[in-house]
Image: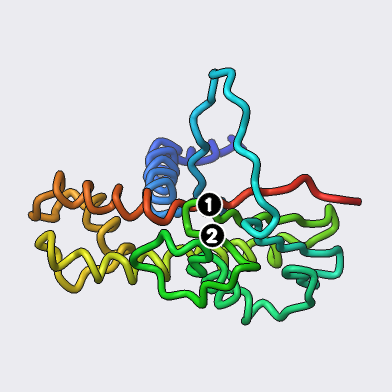
Amino acid sequence: MAKRAAPEVNAGSMADIAFLLLIFFLVTTTIPKDSGISRKLPPIDNSDQEPPILREKNIFKVIINRRDQLLVEDEIKDIKDLRQAAVEFLDNNGDGSCEFCQGKRDPASSDNPIKAVISLENNRETTYAAYIAVQNELVAAYNELRNRRALEIGPQRGFPNMNFVEMQEASNNVQWVGDKDKLKEVIEQIQEEIPQKLAEVAGTN
């Protein structure tokens, strides 16, 4: 009895389907992005000038130990109190040279926002979550003062009811129809008046 030939399966359509599925997954799949902290490094200074000597009272020391505990100016603090403590330090105006500052003018604290420096030191065993949380609070302290300053000078420059963060967002928004050159001048003025001087000290063991 003659053997019947086995029917062949047309695999051409299967290859097309597989190719379409591959394209579908490539188009619809979202790749998660690594989160981090946005920082702009200062330009390299090739001059032979000696760095300015910082007075101890112009340095706001923040230390995170390996247990994620916070030591601020030699005092143990909760992270919820860090932002206000940093704002009071930056806004102190100890030498009276800052016209827009509203601080207590404590002679033992910073002279003015330009001279004030925040020093952050973390242990090598500090968790990344604690490190990010502290960074966020310190940056928020700068933004709080910059927002206040923006609301003070913004109306005079034609930008009423815009805080500093909103000004930055508008400056980076290609669809914003305002005067970007004028807006950038205001942003740069605020950055010069309240510079973000956040120095990181090498971690300890």
Residue 192: x and y, percent?
A: 37, 48
Tag 1: amino acid: Lys
Tag of residue 115:
1
Q: Nearer the viewer, residue 106 or 114?
A: 106
Residue 183: x and y, percent?
A: 18, 52
Q: CA distance from mark 1 to mark 2?
A: 7 Å
- Residue drawn at x 31%, y 63% is 164
Image position of 172 with respect to 111: above or below: above
- At numbered mark 1, what does the secondary structure look like: helix, strand or loop? loop
**The N terminus: image quadrant:** top right
Q: Nearer the viewer, residue 51 or 141?
A: 51
- At numbered mark 2, what does the secondary structure look like: helix, strand or loop? loop
Q: Nearer the viewer, residue 36 or 119?
A: 119
Q: Is 186 left, or right, of 18 in this rendering? A: left
Tag 2: amino acid: Asp
Q: Is 189 left, or right, of 23 in this rendering? A: left
Image position of 200 with respect to 8: above or below: below
Can residue 35 be seen here? The reply is: no
Do callouts 1 and 2 mark residues in contact (Cβ within 8 Å)? yes
